[in-house]
């Protein structure tokens, strides 16, 4: 048995929702599609049509935003009077695209505008007082923030003192007190009533651009899609329309910078979708702000120079490769630390040379592996502080946990699932102990992140057409996730490792007479878990694999669990293989002659008789060190013990199955020689007899034991003599003969059968429980 990595939360429909499903089915929607639409909160066919066909009509009037008219008028005045303007952005993909969108809009109305993206390592996030001072001293008369600003009290107050207006456009959490700005454009402004509250920073910038231009700048929608997807905001309502339309613009984009980035990154813009942006374009743009300055990314998106675009694109591609290598290296080192530390309520991991720009990504990887909140830290530039990023699981509010010891931090901020912090290095042990004490009571023994499952599905119901219909629900993202399906009682067959490091798996899921291609990213090390012969329940996303003109349905596996006993085939393996599996089994020895010197003696259990089995009750991980020959003993063991994982090691000294049973001719040769000689020395002359008769020594010993068991011979002081006029008996009447045959059958099952056959035999014993 193997538990799932995540806590599976299956969405159950109410009676009212089930009625809605039936109504949708009457509108020529498939049962699966109807179910998925109801899961998304849709209750009428009109809502369904609007959801499946997002349009410009879903975009709200930008002047519904508080302060929009005031901000637009101020920008127009600045353009008209030739004032120097600065767009102050952010270093992530949302900030880069926001900056570009607003820059292009101001240029379209005849304005000249400079832009600045703060450096993550020297300026930090949001308005920086020193940067504001520099630009104001250089003559900047109007500053427009994008994707930041609502928390920039100090810098904005300084700008006001100097007579420089600041227009804030932002979408982040509003503070209790707003800064002193000329205007604040925010979808959640406390004095506003904008219909859609979840715009990304680039969405807010797009609304400002629309208001400035008096029409929707359609050519900017590709950037809106990139920034919105990359910032993981809700892909519902207006965002769904902006991203849907933006992806279509992206597919035919004329931006030379995007084409250059696509070329160096092997990205097909013509077929790009939300996954292409989320895993291909977004991370590359983000890499600049993580490792260096992000300003060249704005130049890439806005340039008309092919050569310049390619130079910047290659730099971005190289930076992203460095980011990937850093994440891989640091994650490996962090996981090693986790292994050395053992299980903890919360992990605080630090190393001086870890790169600050990727700490959050690494923390996410560790959380996924451990299902524990994790904070990854490194030494700050001043050498005195530890600076880090944390990620959490759904059941633990990381911001609340950190708030309970906020006096120990130099700085910290964040939300439920993520946080950033810094504190004095000397306080590390104290912080670790304090956080562990807070989190420990919150950790349930089975605490896991949740995985929402839309519905069950059978393999026979999966087809390319079904998946094509599901694609109408896209673009997928926050609040509109790509549907995760559950397929129960399948077998994993033909699984093989793929990828440069063998980190992934590819094979088939088989359910009855039907099969479905499956790919499992990051599960390469678990091939033994998935192929133990047991039935699996799997959850994942359906997709279409297109290769060489063929299109096949496949499941992108997210998680799985194995029901019943898992059987691991380690026959012929070495003891150190158990160490590499990080398991803690007990070792079961059935035969007295088996040598167990190399085994940890406190974990060795000798099972020779029925009553010995009682010693194993309660143990869930067993290793069969040698082959069990007593059918009654092993039957009781598997039927009465609650075994979850069984490792077949099965070392033996004599192989009865391969040796086979002696032929009747060989029995006859021994008997004839004994009849001719009268007696035979079977103590000192056994090797000579074996050579003379051309019968293996083991077979010769067996023949002698059978003759003695049947009363055909006597043996005294090593001398075997023929019994006069013995009772006529068949060889099969000998208990020794039958025991040998039984050993052959047991070795055939345990040593030479496949795992599925062994599992079937064990299942039969369990059914007889």
Image (cartoon, grey):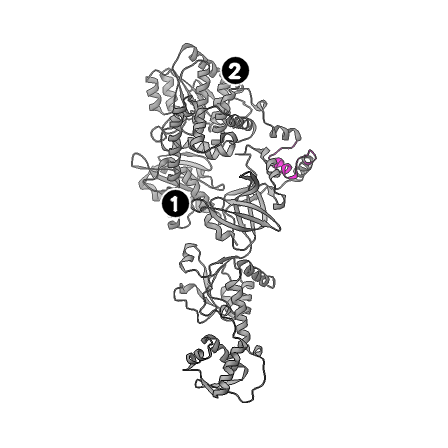
The quarter of the picture where the C terminus appears is bottom right
Residue depicted at x 45% and y 76%: 697
Residue depicted at x 54% and y 89%: 724
User: In terms of image quadrants, where is residue 149?
Assistant: top left
310, above or below 638, in the image: above
Q: Residue furthest left?
A: 383
> Dot 1 corresponds to which residue?
332
Cα separation between marks 1 and 2: 52 Å
Callout 2 secondary element: loop
Using a 10 Å C-alpha cutoff, classify the residue at mark 1 as few (fewer than 14 neighbours), some (14 to 19) or many (20 or more).
some
675, above or below 753, in the image: below
Task: Look at the image and say whether residue 28 sits in the magenta stretch.
Answer: yes
Callout 1 secondary element: helix
The residue stretch that appears in magenta: 25-44
Q: Position of residue 139 (x, y in %)?
A: 34, 15
Q: Position of residue 705 (x, y in %)?
A: 50, 79
Q: Residue furthest bottom?
A: 724
Q: Nearer the viewer, residue 258 or 46?
A: 258
Query: Is residue 147 in sight in this rendering?
Result: no
577, above or below 416, in the image: below
Whether tag 1 and tag 2 are in contact, CB under 8 A, the answer is no
Of mark 1 and mark 2, the one earlier in the sequence is 2
> Dot 2 corresponds to which residue?
214
User: In terms of image quadrants, where is residue 322?
Assistant: top left
């Amino acid at each position: 048995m193997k538990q799932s990595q995540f806590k599976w939360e299956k969405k159950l429909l109410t009676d009212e929702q089930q009625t809605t499903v039936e109504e949708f089915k009457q509108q020529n929607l498939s049962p699966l599609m109807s179910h998925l639409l109801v899961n998304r909160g849709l209750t009428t066919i009109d809502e369904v049509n609007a959801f499946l066909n997002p349009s410009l009509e879903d975009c709200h009037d930008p002047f519904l935003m508080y302060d929009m008219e005031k901000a637009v008028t101020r920008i127009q005045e600045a353009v008209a009077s030739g004032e120097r303007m600065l767009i102050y952005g952010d270093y992530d993909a949302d900030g880069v695209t926001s900056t570009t969108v607003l820059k292009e809009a101001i240029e379209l109305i005849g304005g000249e505008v400079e832009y600045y993206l703060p450096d993550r390592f020297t300026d930090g996030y949001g308005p920086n007082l020193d940067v504001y001072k520099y630009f104001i001293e250089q003559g900047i008369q109007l500053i427009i923030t994008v994707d930041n600003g609502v928390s920039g009290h100090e810098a904005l107050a300084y700008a006001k003192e100097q007579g420089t207006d600041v227009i804030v456009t932002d979408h982040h959490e509003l503070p209790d007190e707003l800064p002193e700005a000329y205007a604040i454009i925010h979808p959640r402004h406390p004095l506003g009533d904008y219909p859609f509250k979840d715009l990304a920073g680039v969405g807010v910038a797009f609304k400002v651009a629309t208001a400035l231009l008096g029409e929707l700048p359609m050519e900017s929608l590709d950037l809106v899609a990139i920034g919105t997807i990359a910032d993981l905001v809700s892909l519902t309502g207006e965002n769904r329309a902006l991203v849907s339309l933006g992806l279509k613009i992206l597919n035919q984009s004329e931006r030379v910078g995007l084409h250059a980035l696509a070329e160096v990154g092997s990205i097909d813009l013509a077929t790009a979708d939300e996954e292409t942006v989320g895993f291909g374009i977004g991370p590359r743009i983000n890499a600049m702000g993580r490792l260096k300055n992000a300003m060249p990314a704005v130049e890439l998106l806005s340039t008309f120079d092919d050569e310049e675009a390619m130079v910047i694109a290659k730099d971005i591609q190289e930076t992203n490769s460095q980011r990937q290598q850093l994440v891989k290296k640091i994650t490996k080192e962090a996981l090693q630390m986790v292994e050395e530390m053992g299980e903890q309520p919360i992990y605080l991991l630090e190393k001086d040379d870890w790169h600050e720009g990727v700490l959050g990504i690494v923390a996410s990887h560790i959380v996924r592996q451990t299902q524990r909140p994790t904070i990854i830290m490194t030494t700050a530039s001043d050498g005195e502080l530890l600076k880090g990023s944390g990620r959490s699981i759904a059941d633990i509010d990381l911001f609340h946990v950190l708030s309970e010891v906020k006096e120990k931090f130099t700085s910290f901020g964040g939300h439920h699932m993520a946080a950033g912090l810094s504190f004095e290095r000397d306080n590390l042990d104290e912080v670790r102990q304090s956080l562990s004490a807070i989190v420990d009571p919150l950790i349930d023994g089975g605490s896991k992140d949740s995985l929402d499952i839309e519905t069950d599905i059978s393999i026979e119901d999966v087809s390319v057409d079904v998946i094509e219909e599901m694609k109408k629900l896209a673009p997928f993202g926050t609040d509109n996730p790509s549907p995760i399906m559950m397929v129960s009682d399948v077998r994993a067959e033909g699984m093989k490792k793929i990828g440069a490091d063998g980190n992934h798996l590819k094979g088939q899921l088989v359910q009855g007479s039907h099969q479905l291609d499956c790919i499992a990213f990051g599960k390469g090390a678990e091939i033994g878990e998935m192929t133990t012969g047991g039935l699996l329940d799997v959850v994942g996303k359906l997709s279409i694999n297109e290769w060489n003109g063929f299109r096949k349905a496949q499941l992108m596996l997210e998680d799985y669990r194995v029901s019943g006993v898992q059987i691991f085939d380690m026959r012929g393996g070495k003891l150190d293989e158990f160490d590499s599996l990080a398991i803690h089994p007990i070792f079961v020895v059935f035969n007295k002659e088996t040598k167990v010197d190399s085994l940890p003696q406190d974990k060795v259990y000798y099972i020779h008789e029925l009553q010995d089995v009682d010693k194993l009750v309660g143990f869930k991980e067993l290793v069969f060190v040698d082959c069990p020959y007593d059918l009654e003993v092993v039957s009781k063991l598997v039927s009465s013990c609650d075994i979850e994982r069984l490792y077949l090691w099965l070392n033996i000294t004599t192989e009865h199955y391969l040796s086979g049973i002696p032929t009747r001719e060989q029995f006859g040769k021994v008997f004839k020689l004994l009849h001719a000689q009268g007696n035979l020395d079977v103590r000192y002359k056994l090797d000579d007899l074996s050579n003379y008769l051309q019968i293996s020594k083991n077979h010769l010993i067996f023949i002698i034991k059978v003759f003695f068991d049947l009363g055909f011979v006597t043996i005294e002081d090593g001398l075997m003599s023929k019994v006069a006029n013995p009772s006529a008996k068949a060889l099969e009447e000998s208990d020794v003969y039958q025991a040998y045959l039984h050993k052959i059958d047991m070795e055939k099952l345990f040593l030479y059968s496949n795992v599925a056959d062994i599992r079937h035999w064990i299942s039969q014993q369990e059914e007889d429980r």
